[in-house]
Image (spheres, grey):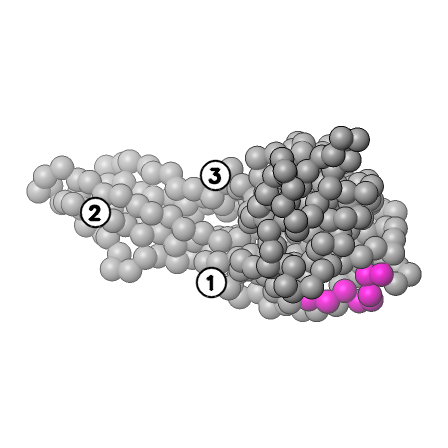
């Protein structure tokens, strides 16, 4: 508990402190402490909260050879639209190569024949392709900016807000909010939508900075992401429809986390880049809560 309170205090410190190095050490009594002062035997805490989920190659290209040539098929196995860009490189002895990269928006769980390359017969046909993609439809428009508190319990405290110098600096997490809360706090869907992606098996820091998480595609095309969840607590499955207030998981301390908290961020695709966007909670985090309503309580 002492370590949790100390790191929360550090995260709420002045801008000068936010730019300093943070150290973690364990004293003779086994108490873990975070401090901005260098202590013999202390480890430097590196904040690299990239918050990037691994999509496990769920957006990919396959090829199909036939008498007319070779057709490239792009697949989206995710429960969300994706914007893709396919570029043909180093093409030799083939026709049908587009002058510019092909961009398209694939709907959830869609496969599409994108182009066919035909051998010219002048030598060995050869080419390479490069696929880029981003979650979300770039045409999505954020329909609301005020979100019900996505948890049950509290009141709690914000330990890092938008533009926080520790980890809210990149495009994907610039407008994220970290809320310190005990492990096991029920996390609720703040808005209705479809569960796009989950991670439920990480323990401790794990292999993913986001830890265990749930990503929900809202009806307006934006996405809410709930990170650092407790291992084994995710209560929803990919492709499942959830209402506002539906139980998603329990809060935890997994991934790149300095202490038990929820990292909540809203994102949208702005053109082959999924970025965080500004939002507000409908009430102060440290006030008596009026939680997201509806769904399973």
- Secondary element under disc 1, as helix, strand or loop, is loop
Which disc number belongs to residue 271?
A: 1
Residue 294 in sight here: no
Q: Nearer the viewer, residue 166 or 64?
A: 166
User: Could you tell me which residue is drawn at 27 percent across and 50 percent down?
Assistant: 88
Helix, strand or loop status at disc 3 = loop
Instruction: Tell me, yes or no, whether the two marked residues, 2 and 3, touch with CB atoms within 8 Å.
Output: no
Using a 10 Å C-alpha cutoff, classify the residue at mark 1 as few (fewer than 14 neighbours), some (14 to 19) or many (20 or more): some
Residues in magenta? 279-286
Q: Is residue 118 left or right of residue 49?
A: left
* Residue at horizontal 59 percent and vertical 59 percent from the top: 19
Q: Of 94 and 150, which appears nearest the observer?
A: 150
Q: CA distance from mark 2 to mark 1?
A: 25 Å
Distance from the alpha carbon under mark 2 to that under mark 3: 23 Å
Which image quarter: residue 45? Answer: top right
Farthest residue to the right: give it: 288
Q: Which residue is under mark 3?
A: 57
> Residue 263 vs residue 286: left or right?
left
Whether residue 260 is situated above or below residue 162 in the rendered picture: above
Which is more N-terminal, label 3 or label 1?
A: 3
**Percent position of residue 157, x then y:** 80, 57
Relative height, residue 169 to residue 59 (above, below): below
State the image coordinates of residue 153 (x, y, percent, origin top left): 88, 51
Secondary element at image label 2: strand
- Residue, x 65% and y 42% (percent of image)? 39
Label located before the other in sequence (2 or 3): 3
Tell me the tag on residue 90. Answer: 2
200 falls in the magenta region? no
Comparing 182 with 102, the one in front is 182
Q: Main secondary structure of the magenta part?
A: loop
């Amino acid at each position: 508990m002492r370590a949790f309170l100390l790191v929360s205090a550090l995260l709420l410190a002045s801008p000068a402190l936010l730019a300093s190095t943070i150290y973690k050490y364990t004293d003779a009594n086994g108490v873990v402490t975070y401090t901005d002062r260098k202590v013999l035997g202390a480890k430097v805490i590196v904040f690299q909260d990239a918050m990037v989920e691994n999509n496990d190659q769920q957006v990919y290209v396959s090829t199909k050879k036939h008498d007319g040539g070779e057709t490239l098929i792009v697949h989206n196995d995710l429960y969300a639209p994706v914007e893709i860009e396919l570029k043909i490189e180093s093409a030799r002895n083939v026709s049908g190569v587009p002058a510019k990269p092909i961009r398209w928006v694939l709907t959830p769980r869609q496969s599409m024949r994108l182009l066919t390359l035909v051998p010219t017969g002048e030598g060995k046909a050869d080419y390479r392709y490069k696929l880029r993609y981003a979650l979300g439809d770039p045409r999505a428009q954020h329909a609301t900016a005020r979100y019900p508190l996505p948890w049950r319990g509290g009141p709690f405290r914000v330990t890092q807000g938008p533009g926080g110098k520790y980890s809210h600096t990149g495009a994907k997490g610039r407008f994220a909010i970290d809320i310190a809360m005990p492990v096991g706090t029920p996390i609720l869907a703040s808005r209705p939508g479809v569960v796009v992606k989950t991670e439920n098996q990480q323990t401790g820091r794990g292999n993913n900075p986001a830890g265990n998480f749930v990503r929900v595609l809202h009806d307006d095309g934006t996405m809410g992401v709930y990170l650092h969840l407790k291992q084994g607590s995710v209560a929803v499955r990919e492709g499942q429809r959830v209402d506002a207030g539906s139980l998603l998981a329990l809060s935890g301390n997994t991934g790149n986390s300095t202490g038990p908290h929820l990292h909540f961020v809203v994102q949208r695709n702005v053109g082959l880049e999924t970025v965080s966007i500004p939002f507000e909670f409908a009430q102060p985090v440290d006030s008596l809560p009026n939680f997201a309503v509806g769904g399973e309580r």
